[in-house]
């Protein structure tokens, strides 16, 4: 019989990861679901095959039943509070798989706390947008003792992820360092697309020709973000795909890591300054792609492109 799994956190990424875990994870028992806003868990469960999930009322209820606990939450403070709540239960022999984007120092502290209670801890951040999570096309970064990595691998490569970066027996902080540096590439990409499209419009070239160039040369996520900008998705959607607060949290961690390492990532600083303007304009509904709107404002255009 396969282990009993508990999933905590059903944001944009978590929902897609759960879907693939249920559909491709070869689970003998229902996937236990907990989210602070219970309605999200109920909604997800209703969209998955009957009997494949069980919605819980509390973390304690799930911990008592689960062998492996997956967590993907918004920020360090929420992750620390959640794991603190988990560790109030008997966790001897259980595995906690932490998939959130948090600071490297935070993950090392959490690992110590978890292991002191007799459980195992795996740092497992993932690369990819919500659409990639839905399609099982994430890239997972797995760091921790080899036995811990091997215990979790069956649920990643070919299930929730298309591939993995295996950091067995490496310090767990390395997985988060890679995640943060990797996310700096996303910040840079969004910033460059925004600046390029604004220049294309202001110079008279027109944005469609630049979009065609981006799609032909880079494709993939570049095309997706370019489309989100030009279609106005960045200001039209009710709920952000990559919320401004999460993007700024990542930017802060990226800049903190750079400072502690004796360097600077000035592109990330520029993107974060634009994200601050996104938050000012759109509030919590602001999206990372709203950097386009912020750059438009600086050029004397309206934030909204339509």
Image (cartoon, grey):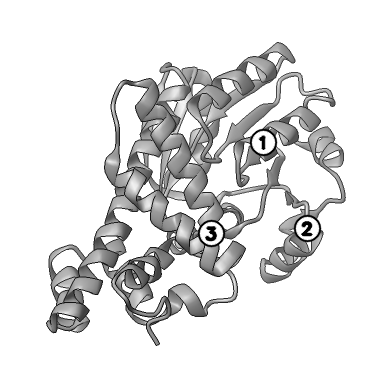
Q: For the point 44% across and 60% down, which residue is it?
A: 288
Q: Residues within 10 Å of mark 2 (few under 14, many from 20)?
A: few
Q: For the point 60% across and 24% down, which residue is it?
A: 121
Q: Check the picture and name the quadrant holding the C terminus.
A: bottom left
Residue at the extreme bottom: 306
How far apart are labels 2 and 3 at the CA level? 17 Å
Marks 2 and 3, the one that precedes in the sequence: 2
Q: Foreground: 26 or 106?
A: 106
Toward which corner of the image does residue 85 lie, by quadrant?
top right
Marks 2 and 1, the one that precedes in the sequence: 2
Q: Is residue 173 visible?
A: yes
Q: Which residue lies under the disc numbered 1? A: 77
- Which of discs 2 and 3 lies nearer the camera? The answer is 3
Q: Position of residue 66 (x, y in %)?
A: 75, 36
How far apart are labels 2 and 1 at the CA level? 17 Å
Tag 2 and tag 1, C-beta contact below 8 Å: no
Q: Which residue lies under the disc numbered 3? A: 243
Q: Position of residue 138 (x, y in %)?
A: 42, 51
Q: Which residue lies under the disc numbered 2? A: 37
Apparent side of residue 15 relative to residue 226 in the rendered image (left or right): right
């Amino acid at each position: 019989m396969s282990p009993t799994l508990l999933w905590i956190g059903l944001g944009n990424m978590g929902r897609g990861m759960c879907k693939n875990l249920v559909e491709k994870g070869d689970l003998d028992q229902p996937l236990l679901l907990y989210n602070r806003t219970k309605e999200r868990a109920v909604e997800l469960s209703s969209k998955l095959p009957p009997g494949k999930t069980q919605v819980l009322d509390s973390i304690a209820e799930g911990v008592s039943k689960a062998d492996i606990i997956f967590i993907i939450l918004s920020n360090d403070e929420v992750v620390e509070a959640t794991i603190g709540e988990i560790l109030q239960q008997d966790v001897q022999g259980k595995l906690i798989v932490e998939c959130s984007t948090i600071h490297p120092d935070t993950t090392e502290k959490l690992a110590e706390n978890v292991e002191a209670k007799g459980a195992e801890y795996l740092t497992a951040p993932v690369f990819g947008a919500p659409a990639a999570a839905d399609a099982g096309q994430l890239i997972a970064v797995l760091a921790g003792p080899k036995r811990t990595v091997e215990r979790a691998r069956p649920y990643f490569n070919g299930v929730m992820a298309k591939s993995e970066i295996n950091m067995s027996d490496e310090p767990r902080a390395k997985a988060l360092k890679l995640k943060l540096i990797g996310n700096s590439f996303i910040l840079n990409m969004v910033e460059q697309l925004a600046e390029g499209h604004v220049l294309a419009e202001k110079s008279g070239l027109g944005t469609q020709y630049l979009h065609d160039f981006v799609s032909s040369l880079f494709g993939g996520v570049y095309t997706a973000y370019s489309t989100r900008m030009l279609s106005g998705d960045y200001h039209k959607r009710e709920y952000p795909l990559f919320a401004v607060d999460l993007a700024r949290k990542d930017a802060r961690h990226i800049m903190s890591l750079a400072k502690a390492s004796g360097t600077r990532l000035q592109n990330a600083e520029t993107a974060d300054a634009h994200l601050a303007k996104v938050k000012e304009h759109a509030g919590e509904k602001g999206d990372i792609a709203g950097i386009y709107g912020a750059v438009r404002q600086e050029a004397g255009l309206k934030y909204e492109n339509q």
